[in-house]
Image: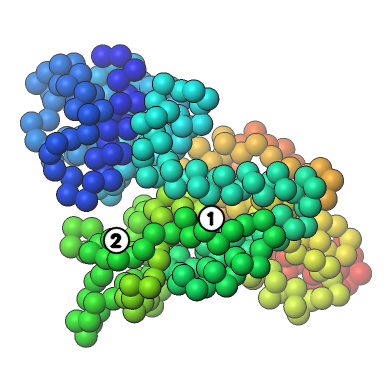
């Protein structure tokens, strides 16, 4: 079977997971690709949809009957935790960025791709404005990104209040990143211990949804050992029709990676408050997100990029360096990964460092990074550097 069938399967599967009931008729692209798979796999082809989903949860290279598609990691599955896998989402995003691509129109009908483009168009807009007004554009970007991370559930009036005062963003553009909770209330409402229906929020992975009659994270793989479910990190929210919720694509692409970035920034700011003589300034997402955090000590500048990937090999080989021209200049660069990755996988950091080709940037865990900041201040206090 030809690799050209693969994009149909990826698009068809994405459409299939978008449908609430997931019953017949299957999306055209899915039927088309399954017909080809059935021919190519003959007796190995699953007889039920459950069997098919089971197959799709295995790495692609274990079952794909033909040449592996370009742009998709064969070690990854197409379905994860009963949802479209992150690898498929990334694949579809890449496909949608190709100019005049063959699949352009059908990709633009996918919610996840549209969600992502809604945010990306705001980012592009602010980057363009930054050429003439870096300060105003950067301030808007920080306001927007922070708002998304701090308000995965938002009230209309909160959005109006904050974004009627920004330089280049309109209230309606930000509203577009959200949808009304009433539209999907049946997958958000879950009874608390007093049997009252509530919405639920995890402090690490955001709004929770009901899957297989249970409350679950939007990205269960992130939460294996990280989700603070039993440590008070899951909070009930009073369900109101006035509430909006982040669209799924924005939740996955903007909220989730932003949580550890904002949390490290908050830690640094708190630390700066006690050490004002030694840290001049801390900038979140400098240069409209050239990198994550810039720390200006009195004698040098540090640049930090936070990276959270399950696979340390892929993370290491994907690192390309931290931008450092003009105001983005730095003396010491750090790639920082969350501590829980070391707990999920022994030797995680070593693998990232060994797989990386980057010279001159430290790759360390959050804990080690914080210790470096503490040591730096100690040494400045002693008159060193
Ligand atoms: Zn969680």
Residue at 18% across, 58% down: 212
User: Can you see residue 61?
Assistant: no
Residue at 85% across, 57% down: 300
Graded by Cα atoms within 10 Å as few (under 14), some (14 to 19) or many (20 or more), the crowding at tag 1 reads some
Point out which mark residue 183 bears: 2
Provide residue 188's location: percent of width, then percent of height: 28, 66
Q: In this picture, is 302 found above or below 313?
A: below
Residue at 66% across, 63% down: 166
User: Is residue 84 toward the left or the right of residue 142 in the image?
Assistant: left
Q: Quadrant of residue 5?
A: top left
Q: Quick one: label 1 or label 2, which is nearer the N terminus?
A: 1
Point out which mark residue 173 bears: 1
User: Is residue 299 toward the left or the right of residue 198 in the image?
Assistant: right
User: Is residue 92 toward the left or the right of residue 46 in the image?
Assistant: right
For the view shown, which residue lies furthest in the top direction? 2
Q: Quadrant of the N terminus?
A: top left
Q: In this picture, is 256 found above or below 73?
A: below
Q: Quadrant of residue 52?
A: top left
Q: Nearer the viewer, residue 56 or 170?
A: 170
Q: In this picture, is 380 found above or below 246?
A: below
């Amino acid at each position: 079977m030809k690799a050209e069938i693969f994009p149909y399967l990826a698009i068809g599967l994405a459409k299939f997971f978008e449908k609430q009931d997931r019953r017949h008729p299957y999306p055209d692209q899915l039927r088309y690709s399954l017909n080809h798979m059935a021919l190519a796999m003959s007796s190995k082809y699953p007889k039920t949809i459950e069997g098919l989903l089971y197959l799709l949860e295995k790495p692609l290279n274990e079952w794909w009957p033909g040449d592996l598609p370009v742009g998709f990691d064969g070690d990854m599955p197409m379905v994860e935790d009963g949802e479209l896998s992150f690898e498929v989402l990334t694949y579809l995003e890449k496909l949608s960025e190709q100019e005049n691509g063959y699949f352009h129109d059908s990709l633009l009908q996918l919610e996840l791709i549209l969600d992502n483009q809604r945010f990306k168009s705001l980012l592009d807009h602010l980057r363009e404005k930054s050429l003439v007004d870096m300060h105003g554009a950067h301030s808007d970007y920080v306001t927007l990104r922070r708002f998304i991370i701090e308000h995965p559930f938002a009230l209309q009036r909160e959005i109006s209040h904050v974004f009627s005062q920004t330089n280049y963003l309109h209230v309606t553009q930000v509203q577009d990143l959200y949808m009304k909770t009433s539209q999907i209330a049946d997958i958000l409402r879950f009874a608390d211990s007093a049997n009252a229906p509530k919405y639920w929020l995890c402090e690490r992975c955001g709004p929770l949804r009901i899957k297989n009659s249970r409350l679950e994270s939007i990205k269960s793989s992130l939460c294996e050992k990280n989700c603070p479910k039993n440590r008070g990190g899951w909070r009930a929210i009073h369900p109101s029709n006035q509430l909006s919720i982040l669209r799924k694509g924005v939740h996955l692409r903007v909220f989730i990676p932003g949580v550890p970035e904002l949390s490290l920034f908050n830690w640094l700011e708190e630390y700066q408050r006690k050490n004002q003589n030694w840290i001049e300034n801390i900038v979140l997402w400098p240069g409209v997100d050239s990198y994550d955090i810039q720390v200006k000590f009195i004698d040098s500048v540090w640049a930090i990029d936070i990276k959270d990937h399950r696979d340390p090999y892929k993370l290491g080989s994907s690192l390309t360096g931290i931008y450092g021209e003009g105001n983005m200049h730095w003396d010491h660069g750090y790639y920082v990964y969350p501590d829980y990755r070391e707990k999920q996988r022994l030797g995680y950091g070593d693998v990232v460092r060994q797989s990386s080709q980057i010279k001159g940037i430290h790759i360390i865990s959050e804990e080690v990074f914080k210790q470096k900041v503490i040591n730096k201040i100690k040494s400045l206090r002693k008159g060193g550097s």
